[in-house]
Amino acid sequence: MEIGRPGVDWRPPGRAGSSVISAHSLPTGGGDSAVWVRDLHKSYGAVQAVKGLDLRIGRGQIAALLGPNGAGKTTTMEIIEGLKPFDSGQVLVLGMSPLQARRRVGVQLQEGALYDDLTCAETIRLFGRLYGFDTDPVRLLRLVDLEEMLNRRASALSGGQKRRLQIALTLCNDPELVVLDEPTTGLDPLSRRQTWSLIEELHGQGRTVLLTTHYIEEAEQLAELVVIIDHGRVVAEGAPAQLVAELGAAAKISLAAPREPDLARFPGVLRGRWGQGRWELQTKEVGAILAALGRELGEEALRDVTVRPPSLEDVFLDKAGRQLSEDRS
Ligand SMILES: Nc1ncnc2c1ncn2[C@@H]1O[C@H](COP(=O)(O)OP(=O)(O)OP(=O)(O)O)[C@@H](O)[C@H]1O
Ligand SMILES: [Mg+2]
């Protein structure tokens, strides 16, 4: 199926080939959303990459798609970007079909290629012109801290610098929606944080940002909406704090304990493991357990204690954790 042929544009389900639905007959809320996806399906031959995925991202939001390798994140994003046809379902981007919205969307591909022989400045001017913009390379390169590389060829950039140039390229067309597929993979910790700042700046300018990441803390830090995908479907979505609260997971406490504590004396402990002079335990009653530990082991024991509250990572592992050997069909 070719781009621009039936299957790419947004159509009522089961009516491939019919024209794009007019704005006043759009489903409630669909047209107001930056991205609105309903019951999306996409297969590559026998591989069902996306199997009935629903998604709704409000305008001006930062949303993060999380999911294990092969979950269907890139496929979903490329459909939203208008780069990939889909089999069935409904997709609206900025109230339009993905193809119609393409000029207003900035795209950073997971495996984006650069022209080796072009300098950073030439690359930015070229991409800008493709969208009909006279883009200022210095301004964009400054945003990603690459202004010193203005006249350096893409082939002479490091992996992380290439990644940052690709992020700059997403902004060539002054997009309303910025779609970033793993924007910080391969970046050093400082560059990662600079990218976070840039994403927050884009958000501050009123743009919508849709990103994927395998760094859960990145989603926790940036995203107002986190969508966890597994096997081509959404398995959880919400604000990070809401997802963590809904899971109701236990906190993890680790402390020095000279001997194995008697679990029966700590009814609030859900799980405990003692070894090498430390006790690792899980509880939902952190305050009460710490007080009980102080009484049992002495205040001294509490000098060397760490408490890790439940996090988005717990939600991810709960919702998308699975054996690698599990049947993926
Ligand atoms: N061009 C293709 N041809 C055949 N199968 C494909 C193709 N692209 C993706 N797939 C398969 O579709 C499924 C979803 O892939 P996708 O790239 O969307 O996953 P992802 O969530 O982005 O994974 P990752 O975290 O590894 O980037 C996988 O099983 C993958 O092997
Ligand atoms: Mg991917």
Image (cartoon, rainbow, N blue to C red):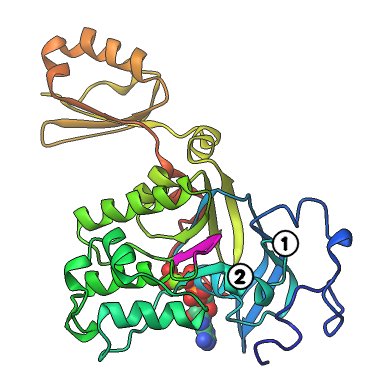
At horizontal 27% and vertical 56% (from top left) the residue drawn is 192
Q: Which residues make up the magenta segment?
A: 174-180
Q: Residues within 10 Å of mark 2 (few under 14, many from 20)?
A: many
Q: Is residue 251 above or below residue 124?
A: above
Q: Is residue 288 above or below residue 9?
A: above
Q: Is residue 22 left or right of residue 79?
A: right
Q: Where is residue 204 in the image (x, y as percent from the top left)?
A: 46, 45
Q: In which quarter of the image is ligand 2?
A: bottom left
Q: Where is residue 258 in the image (x, y as percent from the top left)?
A: 10, 24
Closer to us: 186 or 302: 186
Closer to us: 252 or 139: 139
Give the residue at mark 1. Answer: 95
Q: Position of residue 103 (x, y in %)?
A: 58, 73
Find residue 81 and report its image quarter: bottom right
At horizontal 48% and vertical 41% (from top left) the residue drawn is 240
State whether label 1 is within 8 Å of ligand 1. no
Q: Which amino acid does label 1 sit on?
A: Gly
How far apart in space, not on screen, are marks 2 and 1 (Cα)?
12 Å
Q: Do the residues labelled 2 and 1 touch (CB within 8 Å)?
A: no
| Local secondary structure at mark 2 | helix
Give the residue at mark 2. Answer: 80
How many numbered discs? 2
Between disc 2 and disc 1, the foreground one is 1
Q: Quadrant of the N terminus?
A: bottom right
Q: In this view, does 320 lie to the left or right of 280?
A: right
Q: Is residue 34 left or right of residue 321?
A: right
| Local secondary structure at mark 1 | loop
Q: In this view, does 24 lie to the left or right of 238?
A: right
Q: What residue type is labelled 2?
A: Ile
